[in-house]
Image (cartoon, rainbow, N blue to C red):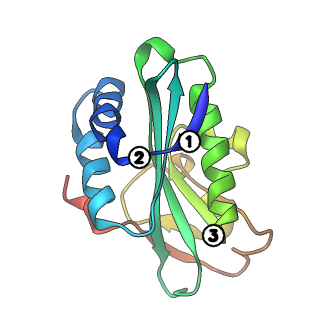
Amino acid sequence: MLIRNEEKKDKIAVRAVNAAAFETTAEAELVDALRVQAHPIISLVAEENGEIIGHIMFSPVSLEGHPNLKAMGLGPLAVIPEHKRESTGAALVRAGLERCKEQGFDAVVVLGHPLYYPAFGFLPSTRFGINCEYDVPAEAFMALELQPGTLDGKTGIIKYHPAFSNV
């Protein structure tokens, strides 16, 4: 399996992966919107035998009251059903977090399964005094410091890109 940056030629395959991985096309539409509207983004694909089998996207988020914090939101993460439970998602998460760190981001947040993301170092965001702009269970909204201590004393509400509200 190869993890690489998404290329223009991958757009249709990435949409198909996101449509197959979720119950609706909302995530596929979100990826299309973020690709056009959000900058910078990190968009990676997992490719096996020339086929795109997984996708992950990171887009900028902001923490109210802390404009200098460089943070990204992880999501969506999608793997086609026949390749789930093969560590494709984990490989995408690890590669994406490494790219975020390489590009100088301080932290990453995720709204996801509270038993999955802690394996990558994510902690409930409430431990940092950070909450999500959406009404979600506290244990499902998590944060990861890419630079140790970067979230110390930075409390507030994480705001996602407006594209998240439009799909």
Q: CA distance from mark 2 to mark 3?
A: 22 Å
Name the residue: 45% across, 11% down.
82
- 146 left or right of 113? right
Give the image location of residue 76, x and y in percent. Answer: 42, 44
Q: Which residue is mark 3?
A: 105
CB within 8 Å, label 1 to label 2: yes
Q: Is residue 33 above or below residue 44?
A: below
Name the residue: 32% across, 57% down.
35
Name the residue: 34% across, 47% down.
8
Give the image location of residue 101, x and y in percent. Answer: 69, 62
Give the image location of residue 7, x and y in percent. Answer: 41, 46
As drawn, which residue projects farthest toward the top?
Answer: 82
- What element does badge 2 sit on? loop
Q: Which residue is mark 1?
A: 4
Give the image location of residue 6, x and y in percent. Answer: 44, 45
Q: What amino acid is at disc 1?
A: Arg
Q: What amino acid is at disc 2?
A: Glu
Q: Which residue is mark 2?
A: 7
Looking at the image, is mark 2 or mark 3 earlier in the sequence?
Answer: 2
- What element does badge 3 sit on? loop
